Amino acid sequence: MKAVTWHGKRDIRVDTVPDPQISEPTDAIVRVTSSGICGSDLHLYEVLGPFLEEGDILGHEPMGVVEEVGSQVTSLRPGDRVVIPFNVSCGTCHMCRTGLHSQCETTQVHRHGTGAALFGYTRLYGQVPGGQAEYMRVPFADTLPVKVPQGPPDARFVYLSDVLPTAWQAVEYAAVPPEGSVCVLGLGPIGDMACRVAKFRGAGQVIGVDLVPERLERARAYGATVLDLREHGDRLAEVIRGMTGGRGPDSVIDAVGMEAHGAPAARFAHNLVGMLPAGLAEKLMERAGVDRLAALRMAIDVVRRGGTISVTGVYGGMTDPLPMLTLFDKQIQLRMGQANVRRWIDDLMPLVSDGDPLGTEGFATHEVALDDAPWAYRTFQAKDEGMVKTLLKP
């Protein structure tokens, strides 16, 4: 089969690799029909190379059709249409039963002290082959895949894999009061959807901040008041407070993470990581201050006293003075952490099955063939050609 594979910094290729096989009686093989490129994939493209091996299959936002099931699978059969959550979660352990699927005790990566394994996302999270491929092996087939109805296009459902539950959890964790105010920093796919979710759930004022014109326009179209970072610069916090009675917003969502602009020293450290031998680079990524904290510091500065910060942007180092890797991975309050995808499916399924109030069908700016993945990664990383969200179509 064809699959999108990692070969080095900014070196993404489409290779022919062996087809996945049933290895456990609880597995399923899924023929992938759509697979998103996530902002988190750009971390692999740029700075998390020390935790990847050449040939690793990327991608954690897939959906498709069941081709084969293991002998113990009872809830799926060939022909079923399914979305695959990005957390590899068993659905039956203590953490999964309490709704913390991103901390699944069955798939925690103890070697690295991290939470649940993820599809297509480095040794830190299990090195599980991902879904930017023609086929993928899906474990825990009775409890992990999300069955969706036949008929509507993939674009209606594929975001159940990551974008929708991540944005929903970001708003849930933000604890926006009824008719309250929320500021979303970063209007990539997650920030954009978080604005839509916040508005849908009754926020009275949604403020979105970014510096890419296409992203600002998308958020404005769904009712957000948008601020262009290029226009306001160092006055941004003052402007936001001025829009919220001088106090600042009730809630702030950091949807940026370590891709934030600014922090020249951190940018240097990111580049340094890419030049070091793998062993040294791993240590630097785990312990050195390579996170760019501009967005988080802005969130802390601008939120009102007694307000809430929800961090959904991914941080990847142990930055002084905040141990962001531990805070993020263990979901320690502010509030933050990987989305517990399965936890939110019952809330989200009616929104994609009956009508489309969050605009999922038109959410992707690009749909391209799997063979075009290297171009799509380059374009997404450069924020060119109006690319905000891309679906690969194997």
Image (cartoon, rainbow, N blue to C red):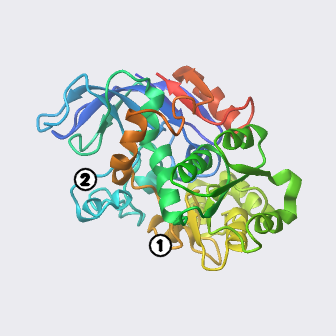
Q: Between residue 12 and residue 94, name the one nearer to us.
A: 94
The residue located at (59%, 62%) in the rendering is 285
Determine whether, in the image, residue 340 is placed left or right of residue 147.
right
**How would you rate the neighbour count of disc 2 (Cα within 10 Å): few for under 14, some for 14-19, many for 20 or more?**
many
What residue type is disc 1 on? Answer: Ile
Mark pair 2, 1: CA separation: 22 Å
Position in image of residue 374 (x %, y %): 62, 29
Q: Between residue 318 and residue 254, name the one nearer to us.
A: 254
Who comes first in sequence, dot 2 or dot 1? 2
Determine whether, in the image, residue 168 is placed left or right of residue 257.
left
Q: Which residue is mark 2?
A: 91
The residue located at (60%, 41%) in the rendering is 8
**How would you rate the neighbour count of disc 1 (Cα within 10 Å): few for under 14, some for 14-19, many for 20 or more?**
few
Position in image of residue 332 (x %, y %): 47, 73
Work out whether residue 128 can be spotted: yes
Position in image of residue 37 (x %, y %): 55, 36
Q: Image height check: is 353 above or below 316? A: above
Work out whether residue 131 can be spotted: no
- Occupied quadrant, residue 372: top right
What residue type is disc 2 on? Answer: Gly
The quarter of the rendered structure image containing the N terminus is top left
The residue located at (50%, 73%) in the rendering is 333
Is there CB contact under 8 Å for labels 2 and 1? no
Q: Which residue is mark 1?
A: 332
Disc 1 element: loop
The residue located at (50%, 70%) in the rendering is 326
